[in-house]
Image (cartoon, helix red, strand yellow):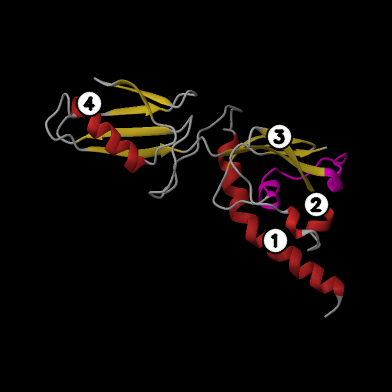
Amino acid sequence: MSSDKKYWIFALSLVLGTGLASRAIGDDRTGTNGTQTTTAAPQVGPEYVIGPADSLEISVWKESDLDAKVPVRPDGKISLPLLGDVTASGFTPTQLAADLSKRLKKYVDDPRVTVVVTAVNSRRIYIVGEVVHTGAYPLLGNMTVLQALSGAGGFSPFASLKNIYVLRNQDGTQVKLPFNYKKVIKGENMQQNVQLRPGDTIVVP
C-alpha cells in the first residue's frame, strides 16, 4: 500500500472517530443568540466528582420542603434548607448524599437523600487563538487534543499548526505541552495527542 493511501486512510479514521465529539462540543458552546449555554448532564457514573458550576438536584424522601435544585458555587459549596452552606465539590453524588443524610439527622427521622447531577459544567477545556470558534468546551470522556480541535470549526489562515500547545496547571505550576498538528494528523508524534484534563487550554498561535 502506498504511503499516500495509508495517510488518507488514517486521516479518514480520525474524522470518523471525532465527528460525534465535534457535534457534542459544538452543541454546548453558544446558543443562536450568542449567549452561553449549559451542558446537559450525561449519564454520569457513580465515580463522577462534583465540581464548581455543576448543577445538582437534591431530594429528601417524604420531605419535599427540603428538596432543592442548586448550582455549585465557585467556592465549591451549595446552599440548602436547614443546613445552610454545605461543601459539595470533591464529593461523588453518592458521597454527598450520605453526608447530607448524616447532617439532616438532627432535623429529620431517618433522612434518605438522593443527589442527581443535572448539568456538568465543571469539566471544561478552553480553545483560544487562530480557530473559528474560541471559548469553553465540555470535556467529553477521554477527549484528546485532536478531538477537541475538531469541534473548533477549523483554523484561520494565519494559524501556526506546528506550534499549537496545551497549557495545563500541574501541581500548582503551569506547564506547556507542545502539539504539532501537521505531524499528528500524519500519524507522527502521536504522544503529543494527550488526553485532556479539566481546565486545560489549547492555544493555536
Tell me the amino acid under the disc marked 1: Leu
Marks 3 and 1, how far apart in space? Answer: 29 Å
- Is residue 35 at least partly visible in the picture? yes
Q: Earlier in the sequence, mark 1 or mark 4?
A: 1
Front in this rendered view, residue 120 or 17: 120
The residue under the point 51% across, 35% down is 122
Residues in magenta, as a range: 145-163
Q: Which residue is mark 2?
A: 181
Residue kind at label 3, given as amino acid type: Gln
- Identify the residue under disc 1: 14
Q: Earlier in the sequence, mark 2 or mark 1?
A: 1
Residue at position x 17%, y 34% from top? Answer: 111
Q: Position of residue 44 (x, y in %)?
A: 42, 47
Residue depth check, mark 3 versus mark 4: number of the one nearer the observer: 3
SS at badge 1: helix
Residue 40 has which mark?
Answer: none
Secondary structure type for disc 2: helix
Q: Nearer the viewer, mark 3 or mark 1?
A: 3
Could you tell whether 100 is left or right of 72 in the image? Answer: left
Marks 1 and 4 close (CB-CB < 8 Å): no
For marks 2 and 4, the one nearer the N-term is 4
**How far is mark 1 from mark 4, CA to CA?**
48 Å
10 Å crowding of disc 3: few (<14), some (14-19), many (20+) = few
- The residue tagged 3 is 174
**Quarter of the figure with the N terminus:** bottom right
- At a point 46% along the width and 40% down the height, the residue shown is 40
